[in-house]
Amino acid sequence: MKNRFKAILITKDGTTQTASETELGLDDLMEGDVTVAVSHSTVNYKDGLAITGRSPVVRKFPMIPGIDLAGTVETSSHANFKPGDKVLLNGFGLSETHFGGYSELARVKGDWLVPLPKAFSTSDAMAIGTAGYTSMLCVLALEDAGVTPAKGPVVVTGAAGGVGSVAVALLAKLGYRVIASTGRPEEESYLKELGAAEIIPRSELGGDPRPLSKERWAGAVDSVGSKTLANVIAATQYGGAVAACGLAQGLDLPTSVAPFILRGISLHGVESVYMPMPRRLQAWERLARDLDVKKLASMTQTIKLADVPKAAADILAGQVRGRLVVEIAA
Ligand code: NDP
């Protein structure tokens, strides 16, 4: 194992936060029973918030950001893992209170690790990352609520983003008619290639919501929140369900009880960071079964560690299409 390794480190001086590439030693790593040689990480919206400091994601400074990692176990005193095992990790406080994935080495709790599914390389696992794993959690929530392809279409908001792109691909493969809502009309052919049957402009759902509107879909995957989520709820058909995971438009939710008490719809909050291990494993098993790796490749770009700070700003500006993989070690 290397004694020195490269990482991105966020430091804070007063109110000013800076993220830059640096070299650290083994003694700098945090507590954990497994050390992983990280080969890939990724950039999600939350990574953008952490690196720019736009929201208080980072709770301890200095911090290595990166909410996901995938790589190979170097040392382990955890019963489930041994050197050479391929693993991945999403969330569990990475980049908040524990050093994250933008680092050649990570020392973490074995209880947080997921064995890499055989269907995926470590690069594929990070092309999925927290965004794609959260999309699968949303799909599972809709299935649990009884939303089937026969019940009607499913709308995906923020469709050209990370959560959105994976949700479109997954739902289409499962046989749902997918309506993709995007603010980027130029991504129509991209979204259709992923499996969207219909594209609607973001503006159609972004304005002031009415308590109820025409019933349009049986289900929804929403990564946008705010007025968009309120409009999605108002147009969900009788007995339908909405999985809400994001806040790209805002944290607020200007809705009413009307869709709940007059149409019996349900709203499912989806949280990925502290999701218990059995559901995580289920989500990764289902991703291995239901996500087309060719479509995954078509929605993914690969960048280097040094490109992460720029990518963080770009993702918050809504300028990243699909998913970004960060190559840490080839
Ligand atoms: P991305 O930036 O890749 O995707 C977000 C998409 O939302 C954009 O691509 C854009 O899609 C749309 N969007 C951006 N700004 C606005 C706006 N002002 N109004 C309406 N739509 C907008 O981010 P991710 O996919 O990584 O994450 C999406 C959201 O999900 C984030 O809020 C993130 O924090 C949340 N999330 C939550 C998780 C959880 O555990 N609950 C886990 C993972 C993500 P388009 O251009 O197509 O309109």
Image (spheres, rainbow, N blue to C red):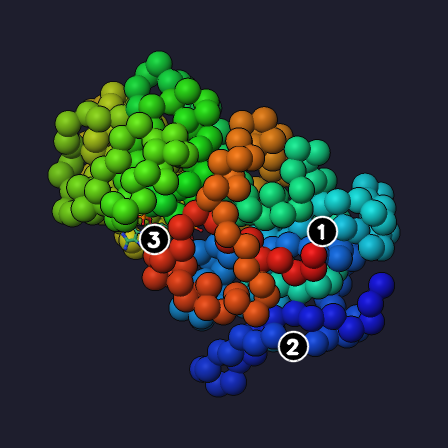
Q: Is mark 3 within 8 Å of ligand 1?
A: yes
Please tell me which residue is depicted at 41% across the width and 20% down the height of the picture: 175
Does dot 1 land on a helix, a strand or a loop? strand
| Label drawn at residue 185 | none
Residue 218, above or below 46: above
Does dot 2 land on a helix, a strand or a loop? strand
Does dot 3 land on a helix, a strand or a loop? loop
Assess disc 1: are there few (<14), some (14-19) or many (≥20) residues with their C-alpha within 10 Å of its C-alpha.
many
Q: Give the residue type at disc 2.
A: Thr
> In screen coordinates, is 234 left or right of 308?
left
Q: Which residue is mark 2?
A: 22
Q: Which residue is mark 1?
A: 71
- Residue 213 pos. (x, y %): 14, 31
Mark pair 3, 1: CA separation: 29 Å
Q: Which residue is mark 3?
A: 248
Query: Looking at the image, do the residues carrying marks 1 and 2 touch, with CB atoms under 8 Å apart?
Result: no
Q: Nearer the viewer, residue 82 or 180?
A: 180
Mark pair 2, 3: CA separation: 30 Å
Camera-nearest label, 3 or 1: 1
Please tell me which residue is depicted at 24% across the width and 23% down the height of the picture: 237
> In screen coordinates, is 206 left or right of 105?
left
Q: Residue furthest top?
A: 150
- Residue 234 pos. (x, y %): 21, 34
Q: Residue furthest bottom?
A: 14
Please tell me which residue is depicted at 75% across the width and 45% down the height of the picture: 86
Assess disc 2: are there few (<14), some (14-19) or many (≥20) residues with their C-alpha within 10 Å of its C-alpha.
few
Confirm whether residue 42 shows in the render.
no
